[in-house]
Each structure stands twice: as structure tokens, then as C-alpha cells.
Image: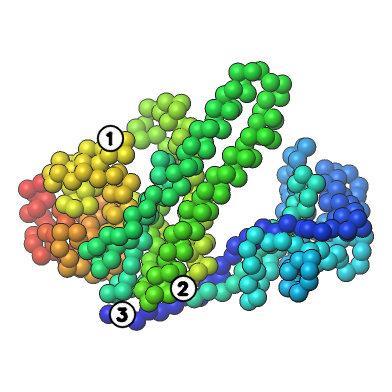
Amino acid sequence: MFKLRSVTLKVKKAIKAKIVFLTKVKKRLLEEEYENLQRFLHGEKAELYSANKQQAKRFYRKIKPNKEYPLSVRKDLLRVERRNTKIAEYWARIPVRGRRGGVWVAIKPHCPIEPDVEICESKLFKRNGDFYIHLTVQKEVGIPKPELTNKTVVIACDIGEANPLTSVELWNQGKKRKNVRFHGRETRNIRAHYNNLKKQVGQKKIKHAVKWIKKHIENKETRKVNDALHKATAKIVDRAEALKKSGYEPIIVFGDLKKVRRSRIKGKTRCRKNNRKIDTMPSHKTKHMLTYKALWKEIPVIPLNEAHTSQLCWICGSLHTEIRKRFFRCKDCGLEHNRDLNGAINIGNRLLGYMLKSRASVNTPQTSPTLTAPKGDSLAISECEGGSPLRKLAVVHSIPTGLFSMKCNNDFPLICSFNLLDYAAQA
């Protein structure tokens, strides 16, 4: 048993708010400031509030023609208050040139604004005749340093294309698995639907088809995909928060997917259909949403190298497996499983095996964590200091689970219960 120690971090997130119930005078002042910003950015002379002009010079270095840019509001000039009025609950003061002291407007945020947050630099947008403000809020949170205890619950997540987010809970140091969930499946259908619409537009030879697609199709597609991902990541974080309130110590871990757009075989390209699926896979967006939402709720979240997690059998640790679409089968132990679920369990087991970089051995039965150092595992290599020849041996050879216990040492990367060199010679 270990005592939890917390780390203080500053976490930011954006709160989207619509400006509502504008009077004619306030709307005219906002429109003048917004239009003057666009003219100033495109090289014309325009009367603009001095602080807004400084922000424009600071942020917008390269200006594209026929594109509108949001008004950046400095945090020392922006003020948000909570008032008990019939019109709106929250009010914001926006600095404009036409009125000294700025304009107080009613806003309707998509979520409540906590009283202890700090309002940072925000953006003012105009869409379809309405004004929106994206408030960037910041607060200090105490993230507990994750340690493996009897109350630790690992929520392992695998990020993919067919199933954008597959989650499973590992209890009792990996002995039990609960609450298997496949989140965000509708994103694949959304992508396919709008891809067919783009094909139809191209076949009809519509004039300025690219501009029409960007205006009418791509914005809708992006909004729907973002909505599905927000809901999927929120379910996982809400589940972790419920476990935390019940007295458990949840840890969210996900596979840090990188370089997914590179071809697996050098010189061999994918077909057009697979290229479209891989290029539109929202892996980075999913990781970002999951990270900031978990940290905002003071829940530790850990990205982990997911090398070979989809190919490794989570029961016997064998790489002698068969994968067909979403189906996974181990040729050694006969396990038949969902491919994404198998990857999620391996990610959770790998975190338990690392013991959060401590490399302590875990005495567990058949479902024990995978304590091997897979090929390309930068975390395992970084844990093994020194120039011992065992480092390369640990990375190149896949050693079955349960044969030895592994931990880090300054002199030798592995301390085994048998002769590792003899095993390598047999392999």
C-alpha cells in the first residue's frame, strides 16, 4: 500500500457561449468592431480598439483572402459575471471602440461556469448573423500521483477507426474485467454518409464545387463527429468520476497512437478507400478530449505506447495470432476475441506491468499483466539505463508472461528469476 501524492497543474478548457438578447445599439457596436477587424487584417484602414489591434498583430501573421477571423479579447479586458436576471444568468463585458468601458452582453454558455476559474484570452465569432464567444477558462487542479493499490481501477482505452474508443475496466490488478464499452461507432457512418454526398456533388459538376462542399457539407460533418466524440469521452470520464466518489482510485490509460498515416510497408501504398478511412480517423482529437476532460475532473490520465497491443494475446502473451477485420484469434491458446477489446486489455495490462514506471513485479494468475518490452517500446527502453546487452535482448525477443518478474535497476535493465540468456539461445 502506498500513499497518494498529488501534483498541482493548470488545466484549460473552452466554454462556448452564444450572445443573446442583443439590443440594436449593442449589436451595431459589435458588428462595427468585428467588421473593422476584418478590414484591418486585409490591409485597409479601420478604426479599431487599441487592445484588439495589438491582439490582431500578435496572432494573425498570415492572412488568407475571403476569410473571416475571430476577435481576440485580452483577459484583462474581458469580464464575466453571474447575475440573477430574467434575461440570462451570465453576462460578459467586451471591449469595443464605440463605447468607453466596453459593452455588457448576455451570454448563454453550453455548461455552467465555475466560480473559482480564471478567465483567459477568449475569441469572439460571428456565424450566420449571430455572435458567439469562446471563453477559455483555467484552474489549478491537484492530480493524485497514481500508485497501484487494492482500490486502483484502470480504465483502459483503445483508439481505432471502426470503434473510435473501446474501454474496459481492470479491477484487482488485472484479475477482473468489467464494463466493456464501444463508444463513438456512429462517427464511421457519419464519415461515410458525407463522403457519398461529396461524390454526388462531384458527379453533378456543380460550379465551385469545392467551396460549396466546404460551406455546406464539411462544417456539418465536423460538428457531428465532434459531438459524437465529446459524448464518448464524457461517458468515460463520468464513469471515472463516479468511481472516485465511491472511494476508488481510477486511472485512465489510452494508447498513444502516432504516425498512423504512414504506410506499414515502405514503398507500398494503401488503396483509396483505406486511405480515406485512415486519414479521417479522429485519433488526435479523441486523445485531446479525453485528456483535458479527465484532468479537469482531477483524474490521472496516462498515454501509453501501444506497440503490438492488437497483435498480442492478453491471456498467454503470444504473438502467434490471426487478425481478420475486427476478429482476433490466438493460435496457441485458442482465444477468440474482439480485436479492439483485446488491444484495450493489453494497454491496461501493460500499464499494470509498468507499475507506473516502477517496474515492480505483480504476482497475478493467468490474467497477469504483460511485462515484456515490445519492439519499439520507447518507455521500456527509457526505463533501462546503462549500456547492458540485455537491453537489446529485451526489446527484440518477446518473452512469455509468467516466466519471470521484471523491474528496473541502474546496473541491469532486467532482474529475472531464470537465465535470460539461456532463454534467448533457445528462442
Distance between the Cα atoms at labels 2 and 3?
A: 16 Å
Q: Secondary structure at mark 1?
A: strand
| Residue on which disc 2 sits | 143
Residue type highlighted by circle 1 = Arg
Eyeballing the image, is 321 above or below 52?
Answer: above
Residue 257 visible (yes or no): no
| Residue on which disc 1 sits | 324
Residue type highlighted by circle 2 = Ile
- Within 10 angstroms of label 3, few (less than 14), some, or many (20 or more) residues? few
Q: Secondary structure at mark 3?
A: loop
Rendered location of residue 293, percent (x, y): 51, 62
Rendered location of residue 51, percent (x, y): 82, 62
Q: Residue at x 13, y 46 (%)?
A: 333
Q: Residue at x 83, y 66 (%)?
A: 104
Distance between the Cα atoms at labels 1 and 3?
A: 42 Å
Distance between the Cα atoms at labels 1 and 2?
A: 40 Å
Outermost residue on the bottom side: it is: 3
Q: In terms of depth relative to the viewer, which is nearer, 208 or 217?
A: 217
- Within 10 angstroms of label 1, few (less than 14), some, or many (20 or more) residues? few
| Residue on which disc 3 sits | 2
Among numbered discs 1 and 2, the one appearing first in the sequence: 2
Left or right, residue 163 beside residue 68: left
Q: Residue at x 91, y 55 (%)?
A: 24
Q: Secondary structure at mark 2?
A: strand
Quarter in which the N terminus is drawn = bottom left
